[in-house]
Image: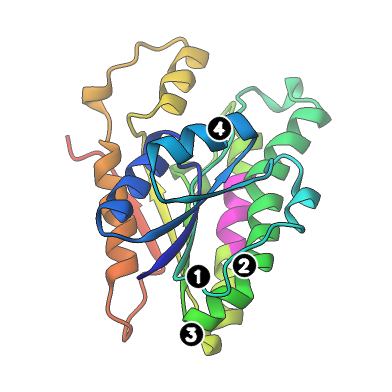
Amino acid sequence: MSTHLITGAGSGIGAVVATRLAERGAELVLLARNERRAEELAERFPGSRTVVADLGRPLELAPLHLPDRLDSLLHIAGVLSLGPVSETDAATWSTVLTTNLVAPAELTRLALPALRAARGQVVFVNSGSGLRANPGWAAYAASKHGLRALADALRAEEHDSGVRVTSVYPGRTATPMQEHTHALEGKPYDPAALIDPESVATAVLTALDLPRDAEMTDVTVRPGK
């Protein structure tokens, strides 16, 4: 039985990935930001294990008790803030960079012994913003560009240990976060015009399922319409 540590399993892409892995009979370790969310995840994914930690406070991750072996660490959680540089204060920069970049780096560091033991895989569900930065998206794009750099460095560092590293860059996907994004932008939200979360989940699982003689490093998922 494979074991997977997942952030962001409460909604959107993370929920779909967790559901599909659970349907395979995988053992899930789900990171929850508080006890209430942990209870919700435990009810939604019977048999899973939940660990409580706030990604906005990476120093709190260190005491986490993780499995001795992990087949994958799936970074799917994240936060979004929009606004021009002239109106984005230091507190906002700190929150976005801490949650979207520092926390994944720290969680990866803590999970590496278990990933090495299983010759496992780290998957960063990044964003199109990790490849380009548009006006009003500076803080979010900076965090995602940093996440790409983290993945690239980690891949080179862990190659000899057998740990594979994949970055997935979805375009706009029909998730609660994207609905919130449209509201911030003042745009109508039409999920039918966006990527289905199932399609992004398929990309993630394809990377996990790839035979061990190869590695998917960077996967861009764009709308097909």
* Mark 3–mark 4 CB contact (< 8 Å): no
Dominant secondary-structure state across the stretch colored magenta = helix
Pointers 1 and 2 in contact (CB under 8 A)? yes
Q: Is residue 101 above or below residue 166?
A: above
Identity of the residue furthest to the bottom in this view: 160
Q: In terms of sequence position, does the residue under pointer 3 or pointer 4 come before the other?
A: 4
Q: Secondary structure at mark 4?
A: helix
- Counting residues from the start of the chain, the first of labels 3 and 2 encountered is 2
The boundaries of the magenta stretch are 143-150
| Mark 4 closeness class: few <14, some 14–19, many ≥20 residues within 10 Å | some
The answer to which of marks 1 and 3 sits earlier in the sequence is 1
Disc 3 or disc 4, which is closer to the eye? 4
Q: Is residue 200 magenta?
A: no
Q: Amino acid at mark 4?
A: Arg
Residue 111 image label: 2
209 vs 172: above or below? below
Q: Which mark, residue 70?
A: 1
Dot 2 or dot 4, earlier in sequence:
4
**Residue 7: x %, y % from top left:** 53, 47
* Mark 2, secondary structure of its residue: helix
Q: Quadrant of the N terminus?
A: bottom left
Instruction: Give the class, few, some or many, for how many residues have Cα within 10 Å of label 3's Cα (few <14, many ≥20).
Output: some
Type of the residue with mark 2:
Ala
From the image, tell me which residue sits under label 4. Answer: 37
Quarter placement of the C terminus: top left
Q: Do residues under tags 3 and 2 come within 8 Å of each other at their CB atoms?
A: no
Res. 94 image quadrant: top right
Give 47 or 17, whichever is nearer the viewer.
47
Counting residues from the start of the chain, the first of labels 4 and 1 encountered is 4
Apparent side of residue 191 relative to residue 79 in the rendered image (left or right): left
The residue identified by callout 3 is: 162
